[in-house]
Amino acid sequence: MENLNQTLMNRFILLGLTNIPYLQTLCVLIFLIIYIITLSANLLLILVVKMNTQLHTPMYLFLSNLSSIDIFFSSTIVPKIMANTLSRDKSISLLDCATQMFFSLALGSTECIILAVMAYDRYAAIYKPLHYNTIMNKRFCIRMVAGSWAMCFINSAIHVSLTFKLPFCKSNLINHFFCEMPPLFRLSCQDTHLNEVVMYISAAIIGVCSLILTLVSYVYIISPILKIHSTAGRHKAFSTCASHLTVVSIYYGTVLLMYMRPHSAYSPEVDKIVSIIYTTVTPMLNPIIYSIRNEHVKNAIRKNMNELFRGFIKRMSLGS
Ligand SMILES: *[C@@H]1O[C@H](CO)[C@@H](O)[C@H](O)[C@H]1NC(C)=O
């Protein structure tokens, strides 16, 4: 039996979200809708920022970076969930599993840092308006973005190699919907203590530091708003900040709940719900909350739509 298990471990079985057939159909439908909204909202934002030179400021360039991360991040996970739920064969090869883990972890942690950088950018814009252009100069922005990508990809490579060194011989059933570290650790018959410590350290460095930077920036952003005299102005500024703060808190909260939880507090059901939020809901909400509600972006979209429409009419009339 022992030997049989050892030889079977070249594939994992992803148990997925549920095994009740009608719920599976419903899940696939919901994920499909979420995925379509995620792709179109993020793509729209990237195009609008690209097409409008007045939006080529650090804030919108960071947002458009965030949108590209969101597109790739959800693409490493959502299509596989749908295929896995619909298919009878729920297996995934070790290589596919490692690839999925590598990209989702790298992109997910880059997103953490970019969210924090965006909060810092707003802080600088409000608190240091005169020095804003020197603080957020092009070189600094490119370095921040490139630095966080590089750091997160290296970090992810370390985790993937440490995780896939483990002997997975307890079972090959992953009670989760994609390949992520905590559920994988539970398949190891060797002590995963070292892996967990490394995971906690990197979650603390990337997650907690980004969270603190974000919260501190927002405290500074929100305190002058409270001093605005007009109620309407205060309300508007406050609601913008509150919606940003809500999506970032949900993101950091769920990620930290997943990666900072002690081994003893393990529950596959909680893991699944928590993971769904940061892998599918956040990438969909980010462009909607941060940009599509923003007046400058809305105006730019309107302008581009008008141009597109006029161009279309012109071509139609030339053609006839
Ligand atoms: C990401 O941000 C950098 C630095 O601000 C910018 O140069 C680059 O164009 C952005 N990339 C995208 C896809 O928006």
Image (cartoon, rainbow, N blue to C red):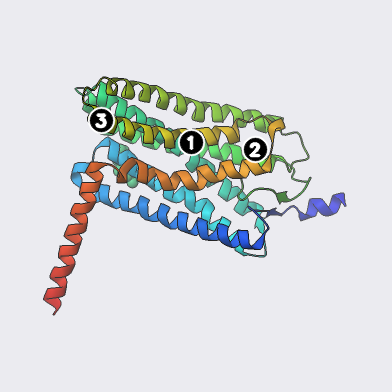
Amino acid at the residue labelled 3: Asn
Q: Give the CA distance from mark 1 to mark 3.
A: 30 Å
Q: Residue at x 33, y 33 (%)?
A: 239
N-terminal label among 2 and 1: 2
Disc 2 target residue? 162
Q: Secondary structure at mark 1?
A: helix
Q: Position of residue 42 (x, y in %)?
A: 36, 50
Please, what is the three-letter code of the amino acid marked with disc 2? Leu
Q: Nearer the viewer, residue 134 or 256?
A: 256
Q: Residues within 10 Å of mark 2 (few under 14, many from 20)?
A: some
Which residue type does callout 1 highlight?
Ile
Q: Judge depth for marks 2 and 1 and give the one in front.
A: 1
Residue at 67 percent of width and 63 percent of height: 89
Within 10 Å of disc 3 (Cα), the crowding (few <14, some 14-19, many 20+) is few
- Residue identified by numbered label 1: 250
Query: 294 or 129: which is nearer to us?
Result: 294
Q: Which mark is residue 137?
A: 3
Task: Single out the residue that lies furthest toward the bottom.
Answer: 320
- Label 1: few (<14), some (14–19) or many (≥20) C-alpha neighbours in 10 Å: some
